[in-house]
Amino acid sequence: MAITSSLGIGSGLDLGSLLEGLKSSEQQRLVPLENRAVSYNTKISAYGTLQSALSGFQSAAEALGDTALFQGVKTRSDSDAFTATAGTDATPGSYSIEVGPLARRQSLVSAGQASVEDSIGSGGTITLSLGDGAGDKSATVQIELGADDSSLAGIRKAINDADIGISASIVNDGSDTPHRLVLSSDATGTDSQISISVSEDNGDGTTPLGDLLTYDSSATGGGANAAMDQSVPARNASLSVNGIDIVSQSNTVEGAIQGVTLNLTGASSEPQTMSASRDTGAVKAALEKFVSAYNRVDKLSDNLTAFNGEDEARGILLGDSTVRNVNSQVRSALNTPVEGGAFSALAEIGISLQRDGTMAIDEPALDKALSNDMAGVSQLLAGGDENAGLSSALVATLESVAGDKGLLQSASDGMQTRIDSLSDQMERKQESIDATVERYRKQFVQLDSIMANLNSTSNYLTQQFESLNTQQGK
């Protein structure tokens, strides 16, 4: 930079600007290569955008290949006594349901104590049971209590720490001895009833803990030695379905109706109607998403390959053979007949390609197909035991054109290889330009030196001539 800026000092010529002009001219040799690199990068970006759109279309096509989509059942009821949720194995039908008393949790309450911190006896062993020992929820645990742990607060903590499905709490009833221990089952129903007994040795024959906590739910009234009161009896839910009486330990009833879970919320004064029917709405929504995803691909492809006349903007991938191949393969997969079912093509269920390349839904035709032959629609889209459906064939095609090893990725990789080659060419070209500019610079330095010498000689001779003229004039 210093040498360039000093060029012309000796000669008085603007050699620095001249050298910069030559350098700028030489750099123009890179412009065609740079433009090609920009073009390739633009195409890579366009391929990526198209890949992304096709990936979204592939996801929508995959959703149509899930047979569970076509087996879905929705329930309908206006009852305030229950709600119903259908699973994948539910079958369509209509049911009359009457709900009786709901299931509830058992609660036991002890006699009141003046303090929650004072010890009750000298400790002992509490045997705490849930259920009758036969059910899945049944459990028995023995809790050792020391003298320091035998207060209401200590008993509450020990029972809660046992974690067998029984919750202990302390309530204050406002009396002179207000603190009362409450034991509640975490689950509803008679299979989750509570029994509690105490073994203790206080040395004086007294049993203060046993006198506070004993209760046997398997005996009438909690047994002869019952010390606790049953404030809320355990109860099973009762209901009837189409006149068949059903008893449930829980207010969530499974199995009474195949594939349907009933959540009981209150007793009904009269039978309530619940209907289960095929969920055509879910299938239709999946098909609408499929059509929208295809149309996004079609619109993007049109924009990328558009030709609007010689003087108009052209699509980035105009004339690109890869895009033509992709579009051809996708349309071929969409139009390939599916064998083995009531329907062989999308057009037969109201979905078809239009003249402008977009896909459209004939609502009445689709609704009719979904209502009258859901199994046939499932066979067409998801396939059956022997034949593959449209979904699997289309997904395979989309993977081959837009997947990690598909046509678009191969085209992108090819463009990247060209860019890498151009980078090497531009690097070599830049070296050549730098060498040429350096040769110019050296020549200008020599020129500047020669011109400086000539100027110096010219000045010397001028001075000598002027001196001679002065002497002759005298």
Image (spheres, helix red, strand yellow):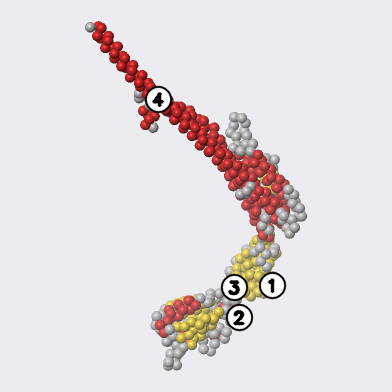
Q: Return the residue at label 1.
A: 243
Q: Quadrant of residue 236?
A: bottom right
Q: Are marks 2 and 1 in contact (CB under 8 Å)?
A: no
Image point (62%, 33%), residue name = 308
Q: Is residue 176 left or right of residue 239?
A: left
**Of label 3 and label 4, which has the lower sequence position?**
3
Q: Return the residue at label 2.
A: 134
- The image shows residue 422, relative to residue 110, as above or below, that is above
Residue 233 visible at all: no
Whole-number angstrom distance, CA of label 3 to CA of label 2? 17 Å
User: Could you say whether the residue bearing mark 4 is in a helix, strand or loop?
Assistant: helix
User: Could you say whether the residue bearing mark 3 is in a helix, strand or loop?
Assistant: loop
> Crowdedness of circle 3 by 10 Å Cα count: few (<14), some, many (20+)?
many
Q: Is residue 28 left or right of residue 325?
A: left
Q: Nearer the viewer, residue 433 or 181?
A: 433
Q: Return the residue at label 3.
A: 250
The disc placed on residue 450 is: none
| Image spot of residue 463 (x, y percent) | 29, 14
**Of label 3 and label 2, which has the lower sequence position?**
2
